[in-house]
Image (tube, coloured by chain):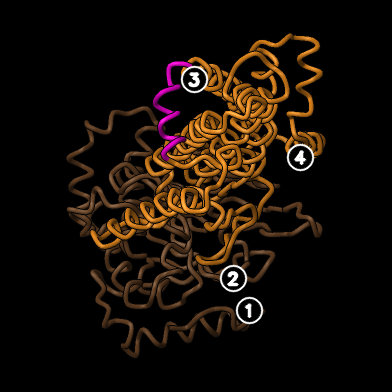
């Protein structure tokens, strides 16, 4: 690791190891995983299903501890949820008994901040993601894509500096997923937030990331790192260029060589 | 403790459409709280017409076949008695309603608090559950003679019987609600820094609300049953007491008037919880 990396690391994971006690025995989910994420960087963690990606992200969010190793934000260890870090989950995870605006106000209620003071910010964010006018709709009245956009607004509204995204678009159809990836790129370019994005979809990772950390199957280890230097803003047409497909096959090859298997999607 | 829950589970969730452990099927819920809605004038007219036919038909049947009054009084006689004897019956209605309301309030509070406490610890739940099931399955009216020996013929033994009938019903349903742990939603609240108490108020209680309301509804109807039964068994007042009084005198119009008043109380309970469910738990259906 170069010196510069360590110094400007916004978020770093050092030797993360995690064992779970389950009914059927002990699961070794993470094994000595380390990575450093620079300030304002968009990185993807790519790996097959069940490789410990979510475990890694939940530890980074301070939602559960590690058996060994640590997570550092700006040099300070994360042991519980941190106000500078917001998490976006696999499912949109909206509360079905609250309408859209009350869902977005949930973090403010928890942090005991008056939502009225942040109303302009929330309205602006809703307009940006195309949800203006849906404030009083309930989650069941919104499509999957709209729900996930609402959950992104909910996380952005409290203005964290780090966004952790746990396969947020895995449940969406391919077209909606493309739209959402464009939206994430746009939000990232406008806000300069540090984003860690977890996915098992190689094309999604390449489209979004500055760097890709490839994980091996369980127990999750860092198997390789790829720098992705396609210019930004990236267009959806990028996905069909020969250069893009070459990167896809390179990463796919790396995963298969590293003991990986077909559980990784190539779209 | 929610914290431990998060620590010990691998964060993978059932995909949409797959039912999760502890999920309550919607059928359970909707059977009690959502009837078919009336939409058109035709439906309203048809409903009124059938009601008129049933009541008028009964009236006609009784007068044509000369059914004796002591077997089944005609609807018009029952209606007349409800109006004429209302001043006499009103204090008894109040007694029954008071027993029901007081017993229900105590029982429902005990039930909800116990449910919230017991679901905190699966171990405690395993120990307590058999006793709760025993209470749910035992008709509490059976205890009334014993309670009368101790507390006399006033309202007290009946209020105690209502409480004993209500709280296990409320508890068992509320506990089912509190057990519906959605790890993802708790994790969401935790990721924004929510405390255990905040997780209860913002996630667990709203999530349990549909089942709590079902428990309150079933509990209150059991409460009415127990209050009436307790008055029948022994007591100096209340609608149940009037039932045994009028039947012993073979005053059947008054007897049936009491039954109609009991039915009205029951229906009032149903409509109340139906509306509460519409307001607080409509997201479930």
Give the residue at mark 1. Answer: A260
Look at the numbered disc 4 and give the secondary structure of its residue. Answer: helix
Figure chain in orange: B
Look at the numbered disc 2 and give the secondary structure of its residue. Answer: loop
Image-based side of A188 in relation to A47, left or right: left
Tag 3, which chain? B
The reply to whether dot 1 and dot 4 touch (C-beta < 8 Å) is no
Tag 4, which chain? B
Can you tell which of label 3 and label 4 is closer to the viewer?
3
Please tell me whether residue A249 belongs to the stretch shown in magenta.
no
Residue A239 is situated, as x and y percent measured from the top left of the image, at 33, 82
Tag 2, which chain? A
Extreme residue in the bottom direction: A242
Q: Which hue belongs to chain A?
A: brown
3 and 2 marks on the same chain: no
Between the residue at mark 1 and the residue at mark 4, the CA separation in whole angstroms equals 56 Å
Between the residue at mark 3 and the residue at mark 2, the CA separation in whole angstroms equals 70 Å
**Residue at the image position 33 percent from the left and 65 percent from the top:** A143
Q: Which residues, given as a range, are shown in magenta?
A: B76-88
Circle on res. B89: 3
**Residue at the image position 53 percent from the left and 45 percent from the top:** B187
Circle on res. B137: 4
Between the residue at mark 1 and the residue at mark 2, the CA separation in whole angstroms equals 11 Å
1 and 3 marks on the same chain: no
Q: Is the magenta stretch mostly helix, strand or loop?
A: helix
Say if residue A215 shows up in the picture: yes
Can you tell which of label 2 and label 4 is closer to the viewer?
4
Look at the numbered disc 1 and give the secondary structure of its residue. Answer: loop
Circle on res. B91: none
3 and 4 marks on the same chain: yes
């Amino acid at each position: 690791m170069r010196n510069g990396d360590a110094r400007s690391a916004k978020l770093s994971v050092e030797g993360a190891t995690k064992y779970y006690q389950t009914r059927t025995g002990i699961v070794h989910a993470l094994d000595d995983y380390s990575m450093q994420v620079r300030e304002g960087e968009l990185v993807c963690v790519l790996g097959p299903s069940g490789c410990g990606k979510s475990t890694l992200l939940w530890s980074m969010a301070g939602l559960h501890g590690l058996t060994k190793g640590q997570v550092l934000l700006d040099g300070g260890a994360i042991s519980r949820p941190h106000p500078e870090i917001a998490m976006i989950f696999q499912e949109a995870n909206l509360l079905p008994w609250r309408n859209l605006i009350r869902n977005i106000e949930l973090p403010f209620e928890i942090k005991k901040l008056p939502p009225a003071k942040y109303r302009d910010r929330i309205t602006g964010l809703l307009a940006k993601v195309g949800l203006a006018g849906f404030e009083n709709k309930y989650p069941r009245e919104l499509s999957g894509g709209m729900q996930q956009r609402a959950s992104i607004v909910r996380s952005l509204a409290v203005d964290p500096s780090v966004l952790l995204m746990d396969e947020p678009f895995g449940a969406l159809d391919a077209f909606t997923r493309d739209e959402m990836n464009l939206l994430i790129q746009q939000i990232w370019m406008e806000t300069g937030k540090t984003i860690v994005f977890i996915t098992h979809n190689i094309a999604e990772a390449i489209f979004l990331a500055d760097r890709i950390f490839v994980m091996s199957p369980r127990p999750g280890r860092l198997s390789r790192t790829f720098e992705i230097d396609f210019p930004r803003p990236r267009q959806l047409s990028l996905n069909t260029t020969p250069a893009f497909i070459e990167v896809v096959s390179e990463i796919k090859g790396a995963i298969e060589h590293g003991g990986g298997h077909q559980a990784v999607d190539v779209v | 403790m929610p914290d431990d829950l998060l620590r010990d589970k691998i964060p993978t969730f059932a995909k949409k459409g797959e039912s999760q452990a502890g999920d309550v099927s919607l059928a359970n819920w909707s059977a009690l709280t959502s009837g078919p809605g009336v939409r058109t004038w035709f439906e309203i007219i048809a409903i009124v017409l059938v009601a008129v036919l049933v009541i008028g038909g009964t009236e006609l049947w009784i007068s044509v076949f000369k059914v004796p009054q002591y077997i089944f009084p005609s609807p018009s006689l029952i209606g007349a008695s409800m109006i004429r004897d209302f001043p006499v019956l009103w204090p008894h209605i109040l007694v029954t309603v008071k027993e029901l309301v007081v017993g229900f309030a105590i029982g429902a509070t005990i039930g909800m608090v116990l449910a919230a406490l017991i679901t905190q610890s699966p171990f405690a739940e395993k120990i307590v559950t058999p006793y709760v099931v025993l209470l749910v399955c035992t008709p509490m009216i059976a205890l009334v003679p014993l309670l009368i020996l101790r507390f006399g013929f006033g309202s007290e033994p009946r209020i105690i019987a209502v409480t004993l009938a209500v709280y296990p019903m409320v508890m068992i349903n509320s506990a089912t609600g509190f057990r519906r742990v959605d790890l993802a939603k708790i994790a969401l609240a935790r990721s924004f820094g929510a405390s255990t108490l905040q997780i209860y108020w913002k996630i667990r209680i709203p999530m349990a609300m549909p089942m709590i309301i079902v428990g309150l509804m079933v509990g209150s109807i059991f409460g009415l049953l127990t209050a009436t039964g307790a008055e029948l068994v022994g007591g100096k007042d209340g609608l149940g007491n009037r039932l045994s009084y009028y039947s012993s005198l073979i005053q059947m119009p008054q007897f049936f008037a009491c039954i109609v008043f009991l039915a009205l109380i029951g229906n009032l309970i149903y409509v109340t919880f139906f509306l509460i469910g519409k307001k607080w738990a409509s997201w479930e259906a």
